[in-house]
Amino acid sequence: MRKQTKISTSSVFIVSGGAKGITRECVLKLAQEYQCKFILLGRSSLQIEPIWARDCFDELKLKKRITEYLISLGEKPTPKTVQKLFNHISSSREIEKTLSNIKSLGGEAEYISVDITDAIALQEKLAVAVKRMGAIAGIIHGAGNLADKLIENKSEQDFETVYAAKVKGLENLLYCVDISQLSYLILFSSIAAFYGNIGQSDYAIANEILNKLAHLIKQHYPNCHVVSINWGPWETGMITSQLKNIFQERNIDIIPVQVGTQLLVEELDVTNHETVQVVIGKPILPIVNKLKSQLKTHHIHRKLTLEANPFLQDHVIAGYPVLPTTCAMSWIANSCEQLYPSYKFFKFINFQILKGIIFNSNVDIEYILELKETNKSNSEIEFNAKIISENRAKKVPFYCHYSTNVKLLKKLPVSPSCNKLNLTKTQFNHDFYQNGKGILFHGPCFQGVKRVLNINLQEITVECLWQGIEERQQGNFQIQTLNPYTTDIQIHCVLIWLEHFYQQICLPAQVQTLEQYAEIPINEKFYVTAEIKSKTETFIISDIKIHNLQGQVYSYMYGTSGTILSKEKLKSR
């Protein structure tokens, strides 16, 4: 014997997306079980079928009749116009079939053509329908859109289309009813929200918001039966044949229509319902792509402007903003990781600064990052990397600004520890930055050195704390694995040492090796120790490591060389 429920023949459900797809199948099942009433909402218009199209259900024959009809109007039929009219007729037939099926099952239904993201139109049309059908007992929110693409290919419009149908649509529906009088609020979410799924970042976000809203509404209206059902893929609905093949390859069960609709009925039958979120479907596990042995060359183009990169105003040399070398490093390292997300950046070998990028004109220049794969295996990937730009003088085709070899690892090695860690505090106190006029010329975005702990002719150790900057300031150089701002601070201690003992300054020229074992923390103290390997009139070479108080190394630069300049010469450059 069936359990007693609140649903009766007089119960009225508002159903978004209810005339088609999986929501339609659920409505038909509910009509069979309860013979209740439905107000179905959809964007498609319900049109009276033309006389010339009646009794023609073969696609090719119907399209032939459409072509003949357009010719009779003096219009030139095109594949696009024929398909558009065919879709209108097919859609109206599907809606009519849904309404007829509900009636044959003992239910009652009315269809409203409306965009649920249009709050005013929705409110006006629903108010009229409610007067005819009666008070609303429940809402089933099944409307949704897909715009499946990898995130780098998604547009703002893609996100808005997917997000609005789910989230804005629900907000508008709830605005049209008295929530305190609702007996049921059923939200159709997705396992993509629970597990995530490739190409569906926007869909996952929108559905996860539904999950959270369900919990929130249940807290405020405990007498309402609220549930967000995280459905797996169905045999019908928005699942494409391509998606269906992908799910089958990944051993994800596809829900048969009869099974899914019965699960919904059972969910509504539950009394004293406390479970707000239900997941129906297997976990979506990440796709493990096989590494192709073919070595490729990648070209990544980027225009750099002062306006798009506010942080550059904090890195001004001789009156002109200059791109920090560490920004070039981060562009290279992070781009390599984006090409192979399951690998992590580990090492630069022979990083050379050949021609710095100086912003001394209003001309937009396009820079090209060339990544040439030189070795690939299941454990590591190596690249030869260059950042180049077009030479407008045409003496040579391109300028090469930076070059290096890069190594990514599947698994990073354990961070080494410092052999000797001298944290003996010294009386060396100084305001290193003085708003760009001190020992260090760097503005606030790059300021991190707090004090010198020890300094002698062989080495220097400084205590640092970098508090981060807003995303807007980071521009084209967002913080990822290799943080260009904290990595730049790594070099500051050499500048302090050189100023303290020789009253000189230097510009970076080369890094023999840079290894990163762990990301440098933000809003947490870290320490930089530089060991001076050699010093001449024109060059300084040092080994620099970033570490924590216990000596665990985050990053290590071996053979970091700088070209020494007098302050007067630097000002004239």
Image (cartoon, rainbow, N blue to C red):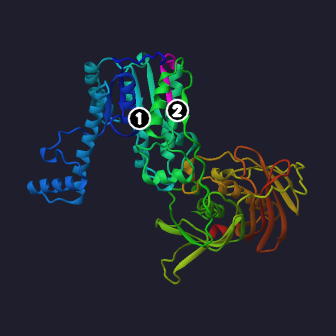
The stretch of residues the image draws in magenta is 220-228
Please name whichever residue, 96 or 374, is drawn nearer the observer in this view of the structure. 96
As drawn, is 77 to the left or to the right of 180?
left
Residue linked to disc 1: 142
Vertical comparison of 271 with 190: above or below = above
Residue at the image position 58 percent from the left and 72 percent from the top: 296
Residue at the image position 17 percent from the left and 59 percent from the top: 77
Residue type of the residue flagged with mark 2: Asn
Residue linked to disc 2: 211
- Where's residue 503, x and y in %? 78, 64
Q: Locate residue 292: give its quadrant.
A: bottom right
As drawn, is 190 to the left or to the right of 486?
left
Please name whichever residue, 34 or 274, is drawn nearer the observer in this view of the structure. 34
Q: Is residue 462 visible in the rendered structure shown here?
A: yes
* Tag 2 secondary structure: helix
Q: Residue furthest bottom?
A: 395
Please name whichever residue, 147 or 440, is drawn nearer the observer in this view of the structure. 147
Are there few (<14), some (14-19), or many (20+) residues within 10 Å of tag 2? Answer: many
- Where's residue 93, x and y in %? 25, 41
- Where's residue 462, x and y in %? 80, 52
Please name whichever residue, 330 or 456, is drawn nearer the observer in this view of the structure. 330
User: Which quarter shows the C terminus?
Assistant: bottom right
